[in-house]
Image (spheres, grey):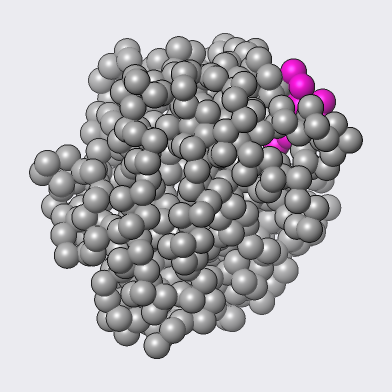
Amino acid sequence: MISPTFSQSSTLQERTRVIVTSDGEIDDECSFVRFLLYTNEWDVEAIVTSSSQYHWQGHKWAGDDWALPYLEAYAEVYPNLLKHDSRYPTPEYLKERTLLGNVESEGEMEKRTPGAELITKVLLDESDNRPIWLQAWGGTNTIARALKTIEEEHPEKMAYVANKIRLYLIWEQDETYQNYIKPHWGKYNILTINSDQFIAYFYNWKQFLPKEQQEYLVGSWMNENILKEHGALCELYKAHENGDFRSEGDSPAFLHTIPTGLRSLESPDFGGWGGRYVEIRENYFTDKVDEPGYSYPKGRWWTKNAWGRNRMKLEIPNDTLLTNYMKPMWQWIGPIQNDFAARADWGVKSYEDANHPPVVVLKNELNIHAKAGEVVKLNAKGSSDPDRDKLTYKWWHYNDAGSYQGNVIIKKSLKRSTSLLVPADAKSGDTIHVICEVNDSGKPSLTRYQRTIITVK
């Protein structure tokens, strides 16, 4: 049985386009396994090997072709993945788009490499105007080279290209964002996320994550759900020898684009599987720092000055401030890992023997205007499950994402239909974000969402 395109991307938003650039670090390789299992969710335009401050040719280098064994393993499980979603790209399609970028040294952006040329071609293509999420798992130098080619050869198209670009950076792992992209393209205010929260998935997770989140990362869970008897691709996953999760510091860059129903692509400050970010300069978003008196640096946000990374080095016991700093990301770890486990199953199991996420559909509008004191009715009656599993519902106020910070009471929050009273002290223009979280009864239990945003009149 081949499933329909059951994810919400087919019904509530257009399909997302992604370009990955990676320096091939060991945690990039772990992220790449997960990424390949989600390629049915996006249009993958390019997978490009780049360099970084940590890795380049001749310096801790994984090899120019580090991605190929993973693509070959993907080819082995591809026929089975198709049983679960017909939108998985062919191995040939992905291999054609996996190219070498600028890798000779940290920040090198002068050479016109095959990877940079492909990015240039994709960005200039006017037959498709959909946004493109450019992910820098390493440095931004190959992206910068592509943009420089456009500036040099097609300056009249810079505004068009900039309008399509969305950047998600895992730190600035070289200086090309500051030295080239920002000075030459800054006037276009390209939406940019620069993440330090990714350290929630970093090598030191045992030191800082809450125990209930760590349960999904220890060897016993990883061995059972990912590493053993889950096909050629998962066999390549570089966990620790005992099965413990190692690191996937780059995964948030694509977790942000998975269509879960959280609407995180609408604004980085909405929050979702890829974290939640605040705007510190025009269209430039990074991590929310709650330390009193803190001032963000004006330039590069990276290993030497990113707040969380430096706080981590202090090794403060039971550091609540650091744990809360990472919460916009780690609060989703349970659903994220269960989803990963289901995808691992897709590589080896039939459609009937695996689980697939529920589809959450609300009868109410997703954007509602209401007065203070008004009752707002919410209804998830249109939700369903492709496996006909039993669904459970939970409605909750995501107060970090909205501007109204008071208490919002949701009646019958565990029912399919509910209501809430807009608080009497809510001011005109305040926003209240309400999440409908739906879990199925399959194994592993899978979660999807819908977000209703109430704006006070």
Identify the residue at horizontal 51%, vertical 81% (top origin).
4
Residue 6 position in % (x across, y down): 52, 76
Relative side of 437 to 279, left or right: left
Residue 451 position in % (x across, y down): 61, 59
Please indicate, yes or no, whether residue 157 appears anywhere in the rendered image: yes
Q: Indicate whether 80 appears above or below 265.
A: below
Which span of residues is magenta-colored? 183-191
Looking at this rendering, what residue extends furthest in the right direction? 156
Relative side of 310 to 429, left or right: left
Q: Which one is nearer the viewer's eye here, 5 or 153?
A: 153
Identify the residue at horizontal 75%, vertical 51% (top origin).
125
- The quarter in which the N terminus is drawn is bottom left
Identify the residue at horizontal 39%, vertical 35% (top origin).
64
Q: Which one is nearer the viewer's eye here, 386 or 85?
A: 85
Q: Which one is nearer the viewer's eye here, 68 or 423?
A: 68
Residue 59 position in % (x across, y down): 34, 19
Q: Indicate whether 111 appears above or below 295.
A: below
Relative side of 190 to 320, left or right: right
Residue 381 position in % (x across, y down): 57, 80
Most prominent secondary structure in the magenta stretch?
helix
